[in-house]
Image (cartoon, grey):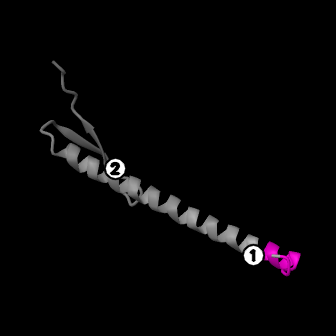
Amino acid sequence: MKGVPHQTRLKRIAKERQKQYNCLTQRIERERKLFVIAQKIQTRKDLLDKTRKVKVKKETVNSPAIYKFQSRRKR
């Protein structure tokens, strides 16, 4: 890059850095959404259990419904 002026090189580096930050932001957002979906799937699996359950909190976009289960004695 001998022929490229210093200012142009800095702009190119800044643009590449911004592109990487945007990619990272998208990955973090996708990871958060997948975590919420995994929680909802796990809640559905837990609801298949035969124990008595009481709904404590409704399901929202960002979190699954919260249930309180009757404690069961481990033998």
Dominant secondary-structure state across the stretch colored magenta: helix
Is residue 73 depicted above or below 13 in this figure?
above
SS for callout 2 = helix
Residue found at the far right of this picture: 6
Relative image position of residue 6 (x, y in whole percent): 87, 75
Residue 5 falls in image quadrant? bottom right
Q: Which residues are magenta?
A: 2-11
Return the residue nearer the eye: 53 or 36. 36
Magenta residue check for 36:
no
Relative image position of residue 11 (x, y in whole percent): 79, 76
Is residue 6 depicted above or below 48 in this figure?
below
Relative image position of residue 71 (x, y in whole percent): 22, 28
Residue at (30, 53) in percent of width and height = 40
Decide: marks 2, 1 in contact (CB < 8 A)? no
SS for callout 1 = helix
Label ID, residue 12: 1
Which of pointers 2 and 1 lies earlier in the amino acid sequence? 1
The N terminus - image quarter: bottom right
